[in-house]
Amino acid sequence: MSGHVVVDARDDSDLAECAEVLGAVHRADGYPVNWPADPEGWLRVDGAVGAWVARLDGRVAGHVLLARPRPVDVAPRLAPPERPTCVVGRLFVAPAARGRRIGARLLERAAREAARRGGARAVLDVVPRDVAAVALYERAGWTFLGAGQQEWGPGELVDVRCYAASPKSEETP
């Protein structure tokens, strides 16, 4: 891979390739923690307001999604109440494509889209053991909001760290 990265809107024709990359991420990092029976379906989220892919030399190398908050989401409850929130999710970068700021570019795209939608602030949660993701959010200047427990399934609570986009990441480049 030579290095030309483009971030654009995801469409249904991208889902099979996204699921393939997600499989590589799961094998390398254990994300998602609970492997979905239908990976393409897992990438479609009720309440999604947008989804984007990063292409490296024309191939899907990363993905991010932005959604309206759900009652079970912890991060929006920890965010300052003066602004609405949108939740970042389904963020992953192919192991072979890392080190090219793809994750940071996807985060920036989601944060800008949230801000464009009525001044909303992008928020997210991450399991503490995912130290690479925590490092990415902190390098990108995202603000630590606090810790909590997120419901990931019926009766399944998981400890998470919650972050909010920095004002800089919301700016249009």
Image: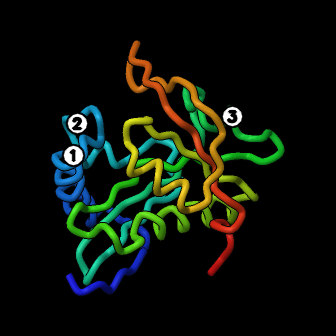
In the displayed structure image, the side of residue 93 where residue 144 appears, left or right: right
What residue do we see at 52% from left, 54% from top?
Answer: 137
Q: Position of residue 72 (x, y in %)?
A: 55, 26
Mark 2 secondary-structure assignment: loop
User: In the rendered image of this protein, does residue 64 appear above or below residue 147?
Assistant: below
How many numbered tags mark residues here?
3
First of labels 3, 1 by sequence position: 1
The residue that label 2 is drawn on is: 35
Residue type at the position of mark 3: Leu
Q: Tell whether label 1 touches label 3 (CB within 8 Å).
A: no
Distance from the alpha carbon under mark 2 to that under mark 3? 27 Å
The residue that label 1 is drawn on is: 26
Q: Tell whether label 2 touches label 1 (CB within 8 Å).
A: yes
Distance from the alpha carbon under mark 3 to that under mark 1? 28 Å
Q: Position of residue 87 (x, y in %)?
A: 56, 46
User: In the rendered image of this protein, does residue 20 appear above or below residue 147?
Assistant: below
Distance from the alpha carbon under mark 1 to that under mark 2? 8 Å
Q: Quadrant of the N terminus?
A: bottom left
| Residue 78, numbered circle | 3
First of labels 1, 2 by sequence position: 1
First of labels 2, 3 by sequence position: 2
What residue do we see at 38% from left, 36% from top?
Answer: 129
Q: Quadrant of the C terminus?
A: bottom right
Crowdedness near tag 2: few (<14), some (14–19) or many (≥20) residues, C-alpha within 10 Å:
some
Residue type at the position of mark 2: Trp
Residue type at the position of mark 1: His
